[in-house]
Image (cartoon, rainbow, N blue to C red):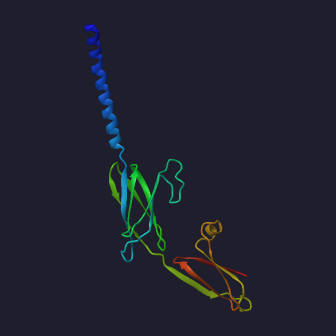
Amino acid sequence: MNRDRSSVSRWAIPVVGLAIVFATFFVAADAAAEPGILQGYVTDAGTGEAVEGAMVVARSGQGGPRGSGGGGHHGFHAWTDGSGFYAMDGMPAGEYTVYCGAGGYQLASAVVTIDDGQTATLDFALEALVFGSVNGTVIDAATGDPIDGAYVMLHRDYEEDMGGGHPPFVAITAGDGTYLIDHVPAGEYLAYARA
């Protein structure tokens, strides 16, 4: 009986040692995979004031701000509070494209790298949208008479707009041939008229 107990003792030591090695490995692996945090402030580029209610979206891979998240891409989002602060946690390490937008502002984006267990800071200063108006008169080229009911359209890019990229701005002339298109974002446009 003594020989049997001795045999059991000899084999018990290596098994316990192996269990300790595996336990150490798994603890180290879990520590290395600790997610990171992304945080920052969103302000008005012109005034420096905080922008409350701005949406911040972070996406890994090639997905855009409205992507579905398929194909292995990870998406995270947050809204800014009254001080313009936002934070996203639980983010796996990697490179993210971050988009930030709010009503009345141009969409902004930046690329940030999240490291394991670290906090990255990314601030945005949003440019306010500037709007203007376009007005004029449509006349008959042969007679010089004003044309009532003519369609006037403004396009950033005609081919893209016609393909559904951006809806054109449209107005219809009044009886004296005049038209007004209001609330047009600042930029360069092509104008078309037809009757």
Q: Write the residue at 61% across / 67% down.
A: 160
Quarter of the image for the C terminus: give it.
bottom right
Farthest front residue in view: 1
Q: Write the residue at 29% across / 24% down.
A: 16
Tell me where residue 93 appears, x and y as whole percent: 38, 49
Please state which of residues 69 and 151 is positioned toward the viewer in this rendering. Answer: 69
User: Quadrant location of residue 179?
Assistant: bottom right
> Is residue 28 in view?
yes
Please state which of residues 60 and 138 is positioned toward the viewer in this rendering. Answer: 60
Tell me where residue 81 appears, x and y as whole percent: 39, 67
Task: Specify whether 2 is left or right of 57.
Answer: left
Q: Vertical placement of 45 versus 77: above or below?
A: below
Tell me where residue 17 appears, x and y as whole percent: 28, 25
Task: Specify whether 104 is left or right of 24.
Answer: right
Q: Vertical placement of 151 versus 3: above or below?
A: below
Q: Vertical placement of 189 versus 32: above or below?
A: below
Quarter of the image for the N terminus: give it.
top left
**Number of numbered discs:** 0
Q: Write the residue at 36% across / 51% down.
A: 36
